[in-house]
Amino acid sequence: MKAVENTSIAERFAEIRGVTMKLIEPLETEDFIIQSHEDVSPAKWHIAHTTWFFERMILKEFKSNYEEFNPAFDFLFNSYYNTIGPYQPRHQRGVLSRPTVNQVIEYRNYVDQQVYNLLAESASETKKEIEALIYMGLQHEQQHQELILMDIKYNFFVNPLFPTYAQTEKRPLSKQQESQFVEFDGGLVEIGHEGNGFAFDNESPRHKVWLEPFKLATKPVTNGEFLEFINSGGYEKPEYWLSDGWSIVKDYNWKAPLYWLKDTEEKWQIFTLAGIQDLELDEPVSHISFYEADAFSRWKGKRLPTEAEWEYASQSVAIRGNTMDDGVYHPVANCDDLQSSSLSKMFGDVWEWTASAYSPYPGSKPLEGALGEYNAKFMCNQMILRGGSCATPVNHIRETYRNFFPPEKRWQFSGFRLAEDQS
């Protein structure tokens, strides 16, 4: 962990915890319990688990004579921290009809007040450590805000009624210019987090990486471009696919990205958090697995960028874009920078798959204690994504952020942009 921002930690705590509660306002009570797949978690579990994090990692460690709201919650809402103890299996989070939604919100309010009390009474020698842990808990909560939107979308998609989560902000539409490639000389460069500001342990230390000269596409691949891949029989041609990816395509009968549908006239539509809408060809393609991104890249005669290439290229790009704060919750076609020769949409809209496996940086050390399980133990069989999405809070995004998912997963807001070597 790094130093926290200058903003009052109590104000920051209230703000971010409030955002989570705003995200669940459109839900009916029945919506809070659904777990339609082992990858997704019920909304009730998310708001309880993020609360448990503050209780278990901070209040129980630093607040004298702290009384747990309910000792059973330590089992129910621990996610995967084996050093803390056993926990409810991930795939069975949806069987928890009790505690009720109201009881979980009551638990949340109780813990929030205890955190405020702790901040008010903390001695100076421990306050800095407590504030740093609270800030990490808020970063953790922002991750779950995106997960809440991801999971609601999937839970609603498997419902034959295709429910609408909310009438979100109107999707800005504009014609994108054709993607070009920006050249980078490469050489010995530095990536990774340094300096002030929060960063997870997997983003450090800053280190040197050698890059051969490369090119990076000015924008992510669009729905229209991916539709060309589909129409060319891309899902039927094994020569474009990694072996594991081809097996997934055949096992699950993939024919298009997740959430793509055809109407009665065989016209493509897409399911969004605002319901079913027409597929906009100029929007960045989303809900793509690594395997699909890699296959498309091979079909185009290109490749995916490495995470080092992506981060190096992004260092000259301002962190702005279509994020959760815009309230659209869907990738949009318009670009902040309409110059065809400039990198655009590096941040927001879709997390971008890279060709890099999730592994530790040279000299990386996980945090001590239970928090050491937060990132390091997942460094196997996962691929790195960069940039943030339309469901990521804007102040949660940074150029060094390393998101990671298994290569077959696609319920996250994931897309990609192309890269190639300089000849």
Image (cartoon, grey):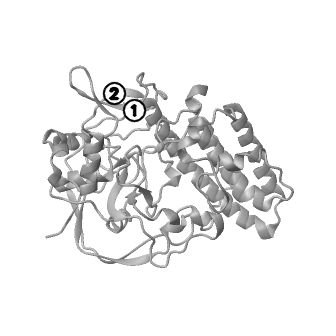
In the picture, measured across the screen, residue 253 lies left or right of residue 190, that is: left
Q: Residue 157's quadrant in the figure? A: top left
* Residue located at (29% from left, 48% from top): 248
* Residue located at (45% from left, 45% from top): 323
Q: Secondary structure at mark 1?
A: strand
Where residue 42 appears, x then y in whole percent? 56, 38
Residue type pointed to by label 2: Gln
Q: Quadrant of the N terminus?
A: bottom right
Q: Secondary structure at mark 2?
A: strand
Residue position marked by numbered label 1 in the rendering: 272
Front-lying residue, 166 or 374: 374
Front-lying residue, 388 or 156: 156
Above or below, 379 against 327 in this view is: below
Q: Determine whether label 2 and label 1 are within 8 Å by CB.
A: yes
Q: Which mark is residue 277?
A: 2
In the picture, measured across the screen, residue 262 lies left or right of residue 95, that is: left
